[in-house]
Amino acid sequence: MMKAAIVSLIIVLFILLYFCIRQSLSIWIDVHSLKRRLHTAKETRWNTEISVYWGRLNKPMRHISDLLSALGWRLSPKGFVYCSATLSLTGISAGVMVFQSIRSVAMLLIILGCLPYLFLRMSLVNRQMATRLEFLPAVELFYQCYLVTGCRHIRIALQRTVEERRLPGEVQAVFDQLYRNLSVKGDDEGSLRRFSLSFGSVWSDYFGSILRVALEEGNNVSDNLRELIFDMRKAQIANQQERHRLLEIRMANFAPILFLVLFMGVNFRLNPEGSYEYYIVDSGGRGMLLNAVVLLFGSLMMGLYLSRRRI
């Protein structure tokens, strides 16, 4: 009990320290922003250009921003990085206090540090699987709206598609987000990239390329849309089979977790004291559980990789 109380106290102190550091950084950033506003307009433009330049070079942050935007999450990339760093520090603390070995510290550091990104990717794969079969009707509706509006402007056709409210929930949200981004933001390239990422298929990449040409050059793309719809109809049966394979991969991913929970539940049900003594108190039992968690994490990563290859 005393050890559990000490661990709980350390965790509480760690959380308080994290919020104190975060609040201090927030105050420092606000003060720095106020000081920066006092500079001349030339210096402000120079700082802005430097920020934009470094932002373009920072590919990992842009990648995370695209994933968050594709899912519609309000979390910022910096907040996502802070969350991963906090979980990494938690893994280090847990490895030192519970397992007391460098190997365990490294394992928990990697697992907990990568856990937010794994969850983000799995959520995106779920979105892509849910919208896989609904993308063809969405493109057909957009093509109809494009013809009705006279093939003049992509944004008008997209607005009409969104206002029709005839798309399924997930697909409606993705098209609505694309319309808002193209109407408000000036980054058409990034908006189309996040749109293609939301569906995660070759057809969405082709559709995004067609929209990009229409937005940049103003050409009539009705023939391209018609050819895309014709090709998607021919490949519709293959898409259904591929979706079934993705479901099989997901079931195979989560089966080991269910078996582990069932195994532990049966052991604690039949022999609570012995199971507690071996799995919790004994260092060998804790090491075995850690190895099982590592294998499960590897299984999820492999399943995510196979899902991305299939999509």
Image (spheres, rainbow, N blue to C red):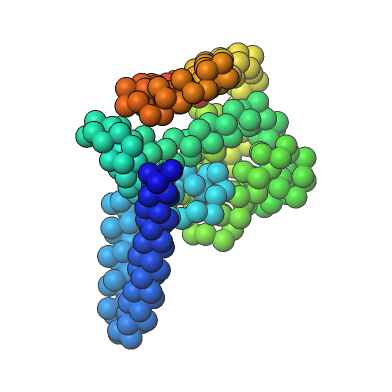
| Closer-to-camera residue (214/297) | 297
Residue 276, position as x, y percentages in the image: 46, 26
> Residue at the spot x=32%, y=45% of the render?
93
On the image, the x and y values in percent for residue 21 come to 35, 65
Outermost residue on the left side: it is: 102
Quadrant (top left, top right, bottom left, bottom right) of the N terminus: top left
- Can the viewer see residue 242 in this picture? no
Q: Residue 57: percent from the left, percent from the top?
A: 28, 51
Q: Is residue 186 left or right of residue 154?
A: left
Q: Pick the residue in front: 255 or 32.
A: 255
Instruction: Determine the residue positioned at 59% across, 28% down.
Output: 129
Q: How many labels, in total? A: 0
In the image, is residue 291 above or below residue 214?
Answer: above
Q: Position of residue 4 (x, y in %)?
A: 42, 44
Q: Residue at x 61, y 23 (%)?
A: 232
> Could you tell me which residue is drawn at 41 percent across and 61 percent down?
16
Foreground residue among 164 and 284: 284
Q: Quadrant of residue 298?
A: top left
261 relative to 140 in the view: left or right: left
Is residue 163 at least partly visible in the picture? yes
Residues 93 and 235: in front is: 93
In this picture, is 99 found above or below 298? below
